[in-house]
Amino acid sequence: MEKLVLYTKTYSGDLNRISVLIDSIKKYNVDKIPYYISVPSAEYELFKNNIDTDYINLVTDESIINTYGLDGWKSQQIVKSSFWKLGVCENYVCIDSDSQFIRPFGVSDFMYDDKTPYTVMHEHKEFFEWCDISNLPFDPKESFMADRQRVMDLFDRKGVYFDFGPSPIVWSSKVWESLENVYIKPNNLTFTQLIETIPSEFTWYGEFLLFDETIKIIPRGPLFKVFHYKKQYDEFVTITNIENISKHYLGVVIQSNWNR
């Protein structure tokens, strides 16, 4: 079993974007961390014929968990959160298809020591500060706080609201397994039911970890610079560049919901 792997759940609509991610991993993966990609079984041959399977471990989503009948947004959260069930790793860096590395990286960027992964954990202040001055037609902070409060209440946690993302995040298989054995099964639930109720896999992982303390918690801020909106990206590139971003982040995420 590997100590750490990289993992992306994707589909045919993101084939072009994940090609960029794959190229960046090949270029900057100095420790040669194994990379896994999962895709729907119906698209397995498409990906097999279009990506480098000598470098990438390609598996089907269904080999991880069957999410038939669920909408794509919830389904991908469930598959990503269940990757640990393949039994290939102790920890995994979950990376979305619309990401790319922009500088060299290695195991020490994701692991505090040989046993403990970093936990992405912060108050999301930079993004909310930008939202406050950008006159968006809605307030992202309201839904952010509402989802987190509901999970916090379940684990009887008080205090500030934490964001346990964005992607990429480092997840411990031990934490996911403990969530299943300590909370899900004793309450006659499934992880699918958790996501259908509160669709935020980052929050379920982070809040349960604070509750259970399954592993030592070593906080770390976002690993990649994330551009949630085109307006945010357009403003940012007028004042800086990739070289400056790489001083503080391993990569960038240009979200596919507006960058298609």
Image: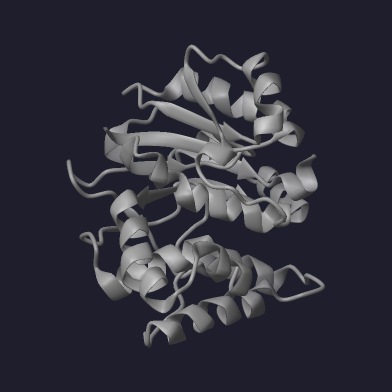
Task: Write the residue at 33% across / 57% down.
Answer: 177
Residue 21 versus residue 256 in the image, above or below? above
Q: Residue at x 47, y 50 (%)?
A: 82
> Which quadrant does the C terminus fall into?
top right
194 with respect to 4 (left or right): right
Which residue is outermost to the front?
188
Vertical placement of residue 140 versus 74, above or below: below
Q: Which quadrant holds residue 78? A: bottom right
**Whole-percent x, y for residue 250 in the image:** 45, 38
Q: How is the image coloured?
A: one colour
Horizontal relation, residue 187 to residue 232: left or right: left
Position in image of residue 220 (x %, y %): 34, 56
User: What's the residue at 67%, 72% (across, down)?
Assistant: 140
Q: Quadrant of the N terminus?
A: top left
Compared to residue 189, the image places residue 61 above or below, namely above
Give the x, y percent position of residue 200: 56, 65
Does residue 212 appear anywhere in the picture? Answer: yes
Residue 45 or residue 53, whichever sits in front: 45
The x, y position of residue 55, in whole percent, is 47, 16
Give me the residue at 33% from left, 50% from top. Answer: 173
Q: Is residue 103 visible?
A: no
